[in-house]
Image (cartoon, grey):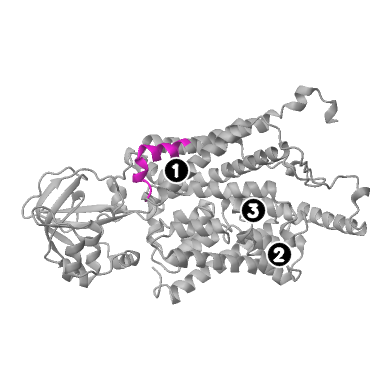
Amino acid sequence: MKAALPPMKAALPPIRPVLRRVVFSLSVLLWAAVMIYFYESGRIVKYLAPDFRPIALAGGLGLAVLGLFNLLTAFREVDCGHDHGEGEGEEHDHEGSDMNPLASLILMTLPVGFSAVTSTDSFSQATLARKGLYENVQPADTPFLASAFPAPTREEIENTHSKTADGYLQFSLMELFFATGDRELQDVIGGMQIETEGRIVMEKNDNPNGTRMRLYRMFMTCCIADSRAIPIILEFSKEPPLLPDNGWVKVAGTMTFPEENGTLKAVLVVTRATAADVPPEEKFLRR
Amino acid sequence: MNADAQQDFALAFLSILFEGAPFILLGTLISGFIDIYLPPGTMDRFLPKNRNLAVIVSGLLGAVFPVCECAVVPVIRRLLGKGLPLGCALTYMLAAPIVNPITALSTWKAFQGQSPLAMTSGRMLLGFLVAVGVGLVVSRISMRKVLRKSIADKVEADAAKKEHHHDHDYDHSCCGHDHSHDHDDSSKKADDSRLIAAMRSAQKDFVEVGVYFTIGVAITALFNTGIAPGAIWLDSLAGNPVAAPAALMALAFILSLCSTSDAFIAATLAKFTWSAKLAFLVLGPMLDVKLVFLYQTVLRRKFILGMSLSVFAFIWAVAVAWETWFGKLVLP
């Protein structure tokens, strides 16, 4: 029967499968373009932890290959090379899908396109609050962090932390926050002259004199969606200096761990606070 | 949705999508190539003759033939027609999306810093036990109580045909159809064709899974950023050892995520207990909104309902028991 068909009809595949392949390829290529763009532009650092960034790039490139390959071969009629037996009819079609091509295009591209265009690469204050910015997070609730920081000695701290020109030991915010759940670490760090950096916001809890602010960074395990705010409290001797709300700052002072209303807190009594450059990494464990 | 909510959604949505998409791609590439290059009868040869042993081995076949839950339903439909026992087919259907190296890798990766080994092995083990349990029960009941009438008819017809073929001692010359495989070694075109067919199959799988993944990620982002109604209520259940697993299982059912990437979403549910996340990760690949629709292409509705309730209750009970007895001993 096939031999009797006019050559053109025999050579060209039906339009519907071709259309479906083209539409599917376009959906895949859009995902590829967005993933590769975010990686190449450097914006990916706000979205994924370092381990996942090359995986995202590989995924984007893989999608580009898949989409382009299928787009370029969309008009080729192929044989899958094996016999499915009699009576299976439509099931022999490895591309058979209940998915409407147009619906799949809309569902796959609209949310991704919308998000890529509207994202400012940061969370609003409301979401930060939801992610623990204003909570007195007890490190005992996050024991996975504990394993990352065994308690060091004072000598070890001085050997492993660099000093600023004016004599402050440079700490990551994580270490200071984590110390609220570790009595040994508090004994070592308490009273030390330290410098650290993070984003600064107004303290909303227990701040009757208005002399307190909060310093935080986001701790990202895999992606920003799973991130948690890691905050400490900044205590100023008088009204805090004018610093950009939610901006990056470097603060220096004396580290203390007072117990307030039955809760142990990490409080830095500030002697200097200055605006700082935005660090290249959102990930917290940056040195 | 105000401007703040839009940017929160966009950030959370893209981050989860970037994280999971490469693993979906990996899974669908593998399933696409299996679809084209693996002869349909191959799996039968891996199974022992003993019925119970065959069910148990079926629960491990995902390690060799990794297929996600979206792809596994059409696969078992085909395998049933090729004579795979029903109990083995359902065991494979429920276990393969969980007990496979891609899911193991993505779970391990997603739970970095949150006991990844315990979560990965716990997920594999519980998924395997549930699937084998269902398979052992199903292998003891009538096929007609499980399969849709049209599928059961076809399976019986295929079985009868197989008998007929055996009677002919594998001489197919009388059947009037060609059983030979079309392997023309002299032509490179055949290889090209198969590669194209595999890539098309992979792309189709990717888009089908990608659509559900997009919807799931969007819903997750809404909950993650507190935009979705009920997000606060869901959070309020997080610390409840009895309600938390049930709440996350209900969430898994609604989100309909792919097993290759659902761990990335579970890992973001920071307020929930370890066992609630385990319940989320075991139930999701076995039962969700999209699977209910897919299952109806093979299984009777009554059976789907019974299986769903049993699987839900069993996983929930295990999660609650774990949290009650062991939850605070070793794991966060």
Kind of residue sitting beneath label 3: Val
Category of crowding for the residue at label 2, using alpha-carbon neighbours closer than 10 angstroms: few (below 14), some (14–19), many (at least 20):
many
Is residue B300 found left or right of A203 in the rendered image?
right
Q: Which residue has dot 1 on it?
A: A57
Report how far apart the C-alphas of labels 1 and 3 lie in the structure. 28 Å
Residue type pointed to by label 1: Leu
In the orientation shown, which residue stands out farthest toward the front? B186
- The label number, if any, that marks residue B87 in the structure image: 2
Chain letter for mark 2: B
Circle 3 is placed at which residue position?
B72
Q: Chain of mark 1?
A: A
Residue B33, given in percent of the width and then of the height, sits at: 64, 47
Name the quadrant of the N terminus of chain A: top right
Magenta span includes B27: no
Disc 3 is attached to a residue of which chain? B
- Mark 3 or 2, nearer chain start: 3
- Residue A260 appears anywhere in the view: no
Q: Are marks 1 and 3 on the same chain?
A: no
Within 10 Å of disc 1 (Cα), the crowding (few <14, some 14-19, many 20+) is many
Q: Amino acid at mark 2?
A: Gly
Which residue is pictured at 17% across the width and 42% down the height?
A244
Labelled pair 3, 2 in contact (Cβ < 8 Å): no
Indicate whether B1 appears above or below A255.
above
For marks 2 and 1, give the CA distance: 41 Å
Q: Quadrant of residue B194?
A: top right
